[in-house]
Image: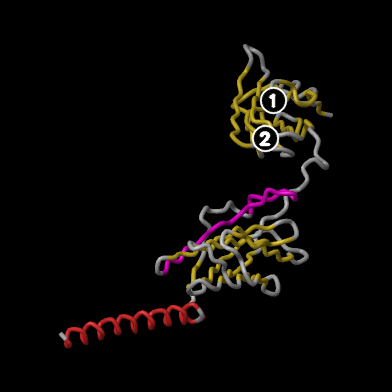
Amino acid sequence: MLMALIATFVIVSCKKTDLSTSESAENASANSSANSILVNSVPSIPLPDCNAECIDPGGPYIQATDFYTHYYGNHSKTVSYVAYNTPTSFVVEVTFVHSGGNSSNTVSVTTSLGLPQSVLTLASGATAIFTFALPTGWNACDNIPFTIRQEGQAAPINMSGSYNLYGVCANKDEGCETSFTGQAIACGNQREAVYTFTSKDAISNFKIQGGLTNFTGADAVVTVTGGSGITQSQWTVGGSSNRVIKVEGSIGQCETITIHITWNSTNSGGIITGSWSVSGNGGEVAPAVAGLTCN
């Protein structure tokens, strides 16, 4: 009986010693930079091309987001961020959530834009906003590396990532008016003309149409630059020598479309085209261009 009690005492004593050792190891791990958790962050949703997209001065901005959750014992902690740039700043918003509702210790953000910034405590569920001034003369697609470090509640988390800046969209309401013009370039038997259309507003279904006089030979060569979803067609009306050209598609706000046409004619001089018009959104969007005349 005495031997059984001694054995029980030894077993309980060993378990208590193991628990104490485990707690000490966890606390040491929580406070050791050598045991930090390193996370190479990639945005949860791929970002658009910084060469093709831009931001409005007042937002909304193009946001990179990601998170990391660390599980330990019966608890977990999550660090998430939103990163973006405004016309003047690079911003990182960091949120900390702990399964036990406990606060984080220091949360800091380091970038290539100056000194690191930090907050000493961040309550579970709260967000800290870190704002870094952009340098004068920054450009779209400049790459900004950054690191987020969270300390407290088990081992520190270090998330590293980078963000390509987005340029500021030009104010399209300034210096942009709807216009439609035509110009005769060559007026001999080998004829050439150019029509240019600029739209102040985006049009998803424009149509530009007009004629060529004294047309002969194979199809006219029609080259269209600008716009999207462009289609073109041409035909001769009845038994006449007039050729009709039609160009359709979509045009963006303040975008310009150029239509370059070359064709053969039976004579030189005089009026080389008929009237050309541009329509969209259910009506005419610019005054028609009268027939172009060769001098």
User: Please, what is the three-letter code of the amino acid marked with disc 1?
Assistant: Gly
Q: Position of residue 141 (x, y in %)?
A: 65, 60
Q: Residue at x 76, y 64 (%)?
A: 137
As rendered, which of 274 and 143 lies closer to the eye?
A: 143
Q: Residue at x 60, y 58 (%)?
A: 82
- Where is 122 relative to 170, above or below? below
Q: Depth check: 65 or 48 in front? A: 65
Amino acid identity at mark 2: Ile
108 left or right, relative to 256: left
Query: Magenta span has 263?
Result: no
Compare residues 254 and 106 and report the one nearer the observer. 106
User: Which residue has dot 2 on it?
Assistant: 251
Q: Disc 1 marks which residue?
A: 280
Outermost front residue: 1
With respect to residue 156, does 7 lie above or below? below
Q: Nearer the viewer, residue 259 or 95?
A: 95
Left or right, 235 with respect to 68, comes to right
Neighbours of disc 1 within 10 Å: few (<14), some (14-19), many (20+): some
Instruction: Classify 253 as above or below 71.
Output: above
Residue 179, x across and y down, in percent: 79, 32
Vertical order, 205 against 143 (above or below) = above
Magenta stretch holds residue 62: yes
Picture quadrant of residue 219: top right
CB contact under 8 Å: marks 2 and 1: yes
Q: Residue sitting at 57 percent across and 69 percent down?
A: 104
Q: Residue 114 in the image: x percent, y percent?
A: 70, 73
Find residue 237 and report its image quarter. Answer: top right
The span shown in magenta is 51-72
- Secondary structure under tag 1 reads strand
- Which residue lies at the image location 81% right of the left edge and 28% below the top edge? 294
- Structural distance between the alpha carbons of marks 2 and 1: 10 Å
